[in-house]
Amino acid sequence: MIVIAASWFRAEHSYRRSRCRRDFRGLRLVCLGISTRLYKRKLMSLLFAPDKLDSVFAALADPTRRAILARLARGEATITELAKPLRVSQPAVSQHIKLLVGAGMVRQRVDGVRRPCRLSSEGLGAADQWLAMLRKGLEANYERLDALLSAMDATEEGTR
């Protein structure tokens, strides 16, 4: 996979560089920036098929997406309704929704020309299971700590 991505990048990069050499120096930098972005996007899509849990936490990392999820927790909403309080453009909200749909946290349905969104338990269920596993580990640690503190209290009372 890495070889495929590297050869794709070399072919794309050399084409862009040779084409951009004829342009002004400032435009050449822009062309190289575009090819770098294409390389990163292509490499990530080839190498890292996103795991459900990773995509859920990546979606939750952005405050805008968390605000969208908080709004959807109150009920179904269209992209226009979601964009109003955020002061973000509709295309930006659409991209956020697309990522949330990919993570399994939001569902969209077609209602004529409208596409209302609503929460889905699919993605949050994976995160909840993972967090439940961590909670069990923490509870076991706290129980061991309680036992240790109880034993220390008993030895202190015995020595007095």
Image: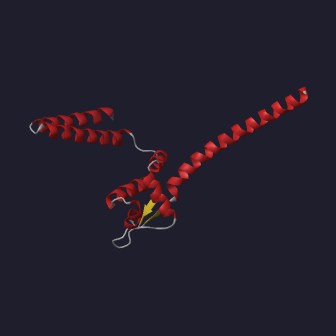
The C terminus appears in which quarter of the rendering? Answer: top right
Number of numbered discs on residues: 0
Q: In the rendered view, how is the structure colored?
A: secondary structure
Q: Residue furthest left?
A: 22
Q: Residue at x 31, y 42 (%)?
A: 41
Please state the horizontal and vertical placement of residue 54, each as a whole percent of the image: 47, 44
Q: Is residue 26 left or right of residue 98?
A: left
Q: Is residue 57 left or right of residue 96?
A: right
Task: Answer yes or no: is residue 104 visible.
Answer: no
The N terminus appears in which quarter of the rendering? Answer: top left
Please state the horizontal and vertical placement of residue 140, each as a whole percent of the image: 70, 39
Query: In the figure, residue 96 lies in which quadrant?
Result: bottom left
Task: Answer yes or no: is residue 156 visible.
Answer: yes
Q: Residue at x 40, y 60 (%)?
A: 86
Please state the horizontal and vertical placement of residue 60, each as a whole percent of the image: 47, 50
Q: Nearer the viewer, residue 14 or 25?
A: 25
Q: Nearer the viewer, residue 130 or 35?
A: 35
